[in-house]
Image (tube, rainbow, N blue to C red):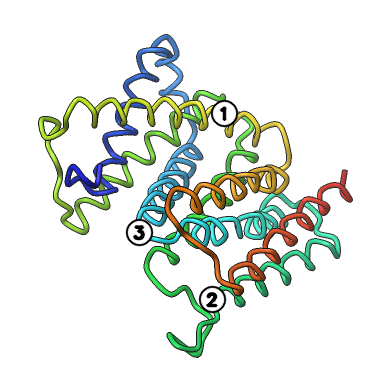
Amino acid sequence: MAEAGVSGVVSTFYTYGIVMLIAVLIFAKHWREIFKLPTSIIWLSLAAGWTNLSYILAIIDGEVVRVMLLFYLSPIWTLVLAHFWLKEKTPVTGYIAIATSLLGALIMFHDPQLSSLPMPRNTAEWLALSSGMGFSLSNVITRKSSHLSLLAKSFAVWGGVLVVAVIFVLLFQTPFSAPSAFSSTNWLVMVLIALLLMAATLFVQYGVTQIEATRASVLFLFELVVAAVAAYYLANETMSLNDWVGGGLIVVAAIFAASNHKAVD
C-alpha cells in the first residue's frame, strides 16, 4: 500500500471498512441489537480503535521487534488496571512483574547518544507504548463488559478503528486516497487482510471474555517469536544487546503477571 502512495492511516481505514462491510452482510440479522447497547461500548470502541491504529502506524515506521516488545508491556498495564478497576488482588509476583518489566523497558530505551533519559527514541516507539496501554484498557473493558455479546464487542473494535482513523485524518490533514486510486492487487491485499483481522478480532474477543485479562495478554506473547523470525528474514532487522536484555526482562515480567492469576485462582 505504501508503494501505491497510500498512508498507513488511509490503508487502515479502507481495510477496516471492508471488515465492517463483510460483517454487516454476514451478521445483518443482529442489527436490532445496536439500539440496545450500553455506553460502555463507546469506551471499548475508542480504546480498541486507538490500539489498532497506533499499532499499525508503529509497525510501519518502527523496528518490528522493538515495537512488539514495547507493545507487550501491556500485561503490566493490564495488571494495574485489573487491580484498581476489576478489583483483582495483586500478590507479590504481580509487583515483581511490574518492576521487572519497567526495568526491561528502561534498558531498551537507554541510549546515551540520543538522550540521558531512557525514553522512546522516536514517534513509532511512543505509538507502540500507547498502543499497549490501549490494548490493556480494551482487554479490561472487554472483561468487565460481560453483558455485551461477542458480536457487539467485535463491531465495537472495527467501528472504533474507523472512527479513530477519520479523526486522525482530519486532525493531521492526511491526504485521503480515492477508491479509484487502488489497483486490483491493492484491493485483493486489503480484502485478505480484512478477513484475517476479522477472524483475529472474533478470536481475541472470545478468548479475553473467557479467561483473565492478564493471562490473555501473556498468551499473545507467542507473536513475539513469529515477529522476531519474520523481521530477521523478511525485513533484515537485528536486535542490539540492550534490546535482547530488555526484551527478555519484559517477557519474564509477563510470565510473572500470568502467575499472578494462577495464585489467585
Residue 256, picture quadrant: bottom right
Under circle 2, the secondary element is helix
Q: Residue at x 41, y 44 (%)?
A: 49
Quadrant placement of the N terminus: top left
Comes first in the chain, label 3 or label 2: 3
Which x, y percent locates residue 77?
62, 59
How many neighbours does mark 2 have within 10 angstroms: few (below 14), some (14-19), or many (20 or more)? many
In the picture provided, is 165 more to the left or to the right than 157?
left
Q: Amino acid at mark 3?
A: Asp
Judge by depth and name the residue closer to the eye, 89 or 192.
Answer: 192
> Residue type at mark 2?
Phe
Question: Split into 4 quadrants, where in the image is the C terminus?
Answer: top right
Please, what is the three-letter code of the amino acid marked with disc 1?
Leu
Q: Is residue 14 above or below residue 85?
A: above
Could you tell me which residue is drawn at 10 percent across and 30 percent down?
180
Mark 2 and mark 1: Cα distance apart in space? 39 Å
Q: Quadrant of residue 253?
A: bottom right
| Residue hosting label 1 | 148
Element marked by disc 1: loop
State the mark number for residue 61. Answer: 3
- Give the label, 2 or 1, closer to the camera: 2
Is 109 placed left or right of 102 in the picture? left
Residue toward you, 241 or 42: 241
Residue 109, numbered circle = 2
How far is disc 3 from disc 1 in space, using C-alphas?
Answer: 35 Å
Task: Give coordinates of residue 252: x percent, y percent.
Answer: 75, 61
* Percent x, y of residue 30: 45, 14
